[in-house]
Image (cartoon, rainbow, N blue to C red):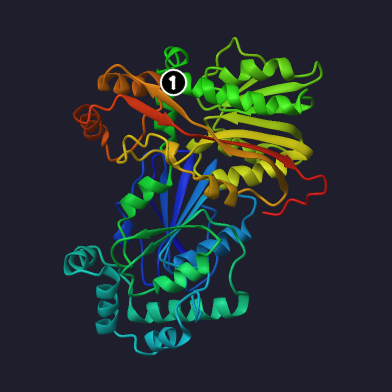
Amino acid sequence: MNHTIVSHTGSSRLIIFFAGWGMDHTPFRNMRYPGYDVAVVWNYSESGFTSDFWRGYSEICILAWSYGVYYAGRFIENHPELPVTARVAVNGTLYPVDKEKGIPAQIFNATLSALSEQNVKKFYRRMCGSSVAYESFMDNSPGRSVESLAAELTAIGEDFSIYGAPQCRWDKAYISADDRIFPPEAQFAAWNEMAETITLPGAHLPDFSRILEESFILKDGVSDAFARSAGTYSENAPAQYFVAQHLASIIKREAPLSGNVVEIGCGSGFLTRLIAPLLTDTASLTLIDVSPIDSSLPGKHIREDAETYMFQIKESSLSAILSASAVQWFNSPATFLRNALRVLVPGGILAVAVYADTTFNEIPELKSPSKVFSIESLKSIIPHGFEVDVCDAGEYVQEFEASIDVLRHFRLTGVAPVSPSDDSPVLARKILRSNITSLSYNPLFLLLTKKKYCNFVD
């Protein structure tokens, strides 16, 4: 396999994009996402890489397209030691040649036997879906020979026949409704109960800028927003205090807390101060937050991205993990839950509060990590090694005197969505024009206990 770093910013986070068959880095050389380096992987004629280009990154996110999904799965399977968080598939499955879950063998073989420059162009046309998209793609078309494409396709078929489908978990699978390359019905069959499926309009070649924006968190922007609001957050965040109070009442059922206790995303300390009286004298409290931590808060303070810091924690070393209003800012809450299962002792608890997809329902256009879950989707990512003690929903409606106060609330708390498309002015005008004077917060609460006889398996 070949790889090309198309965006090198010196970030500690890396997005690895596994391109489809017949590609090189050229069509994707302008792929960018703020706060991340981006590497494009292409040409699957030979397995393996000539270098560990991912070495040194604290977080790796996987984005894979078409036949690249299969090889991304193989990469994840072969490198369980890597800090891989989000795993996003686009118009592909882990079954490249399969009657029900991939491209049927007769179509695969017919494509291979009829390869020619003319047929490759026909393939690109079907892949792009429209003449405009095709012309744009051909302006940056791959520099691959027909011979190299034949060798790659042969290798894909042989590899799958030997090794079968990779065994690894995924977060999302985007499926284009008009995909004429990889049958949508096969994709839905492959991802059923394996990943969240999201239907896209259009053809096999999608709008990757939209997918990047929907799939990966601008963590630097989130950190900066909360750091700027540190001095005004507490007095302007009654909804978050309500969430902390309710979560603390759930945690109190497990009191007293002993052993190694970690709170993730402590922020201004709403939850910290509520759970501090529940700690025994021998308990050890550690606070982890990506933003500066208030020096008046108890315990050991670690300023890190908690999602990736979890990879550094030893197996079966914590007795409790607590978090209010933070996990929705992670690239992969599902990976976080699996990591939590790994690091908790048997009988250890995980108590978290996140936000449902009905949060901020007054503003349907708002795309925010604070709108990522339904109660069903949250339940679907809970690892089997946990007993579910609590999984319920709450509501807090915050009222404002005027719509301008809604915008002020976003600024003073840092909870406004962070987006590379810079649509904040559009949303602000929408809020003002519609005279929106309330915001609905819909928290979801989880209390999980690690089973006594749990063998962690990712």
Residue 36 lies, with reference to residue 360, above or below; the image says: below
Q: Can you say which quadrant of the picture contains the C terminus?
A: bottom right
Helix, strand or loop at disc 1? Answer: helix
In terms of depth relative to the viewer, which is nearer, 337 or 64?
337
Q: Quadrant of residue 346?
A: top right
221 to the left or right of 308 = left
Amino acid carrying label 1: it is Ala
Q: Residue at x 39, y 38 (%)?
A: 368
223 to the left or right of 161 = left
In terms of depth relative to the viewer, which is nearer, 333 or 289?
333
Q: Residue at x 48, y 42 (%)?
A: 13
225 to the left or right of 402 = right
Residue 140 lies, with reference to residue 367, above or below; the image says: below
Q: From this viewpoint, is residue 57 visible? A: no
Q: Residue at x 31, y 23 (%)?
A: 406
Q: Quadrant of residue 420?
A: top left
Residue 268 lies, with reference to residue 430, above or below; the image says: above
In terms of depth relative to the viewer, which is nearer, 380 or 304?
380
Local packing at callout 1 (Cα closer than 10 Å; few below 14, some 14-19, many 20+) is some
Q: Position of residue 282 (x, y in %)?
A: 81, 19
Q: Residue at x 52, y 58 (%)?
A: 195
Q: Position of residue 298 (x, y in %)?
A: 66, 14
Q: Position of residue 155 (x, y in %)?
A: 50, 78
| Residue carrying label 1 | 227
Residue 265 lies, with reference to residue 151, above or below; the image says: above
